[in-house]
Amino acid sequence: MKAYLDIETCASGQVTVVGIYREDRGFRQLIGGEITDVSVWEALDGVDTLCTFNGDRFDLPILERQTRLGLRGSFRSLDLLRECRRAGVKGGLKRVEEHFGIARVTRGMDGRDALRLWARYENAGEREALDLLLAYNREDVMNLVQLERIVVGVGLEVESREPGAESGEPRDESRETRAESHEPRATG
């Protein structure tokens, strides 16, 4: 089972939003204080592969640091940044999406905007800023599904990193809680 994952952070590097899509459970977002070792582990229960864009160098290490979960040691990684580079497509997620014609309602937004939106929500309580940030994160996650299909569809050999190896219309279940079936694994 695969999960598509993307995080947003604030200026201090703290994870503010974790977006996860799984075919069996749909789309889910953890926000602010909801991002704990238990909630992340529960959201990934039954998953064997994490699909990200630059997740090996950004999303997974940052999320591990905050939750103390050993994600890179527990799951295979399919980092689509690496797969796009193999295909000769360079750039960040938004540029790659544009290259492949993947639509985005939040077109023109980037990670700096995500930082500002979280700050507006946290400092001024602007719900509209949070809603836009969540829409941006949702597109980041859901566009990974399309990007993977395209990259695999052009005949690239997709190679996922094994756990512990070195390497650099969905349902919306946002903020729902499920019963735990695994204990979170803490890193050293």
Image (cartoon, grey):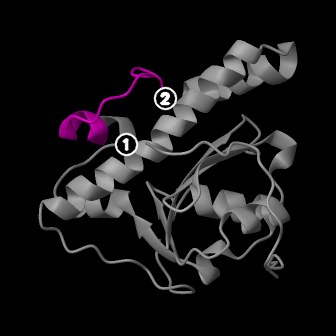
Q: Is residue 46 above or below residue 156?
A: below
User: Would you say 71 lies left or right of 38 here?
Assistant: left
Q: Is residue 81 above or below residue 176?
A: below
Residue of label 2: 110
Which secondary structure, mark 2?
A: loop
- For image coordinates 83% across by 71% down, the residue present is 180
Q: Is residue 14 above or below residue 60?
A: above
Q: Amino acid at mark 2?
A: Asp
The residues colored magenta run 96-111
Q: Where residue 73 sits in the image (x, y, percent)?
A: 62, 82
- For image coordinates 46% across by 76% down, the residue present is 167
Q: Image quadrant of residue 48?
A: bottom right
User: Would you say 27 lies left or right of 142 here?
Assistant: right
Residue of label 1: 92
- For image coordinates 76% across by 44% down, the residue present is 175
Q: Where residue 133 sits in the image (x, y, percent)?
A: 62, 27
Q: How many marks?
A: 2
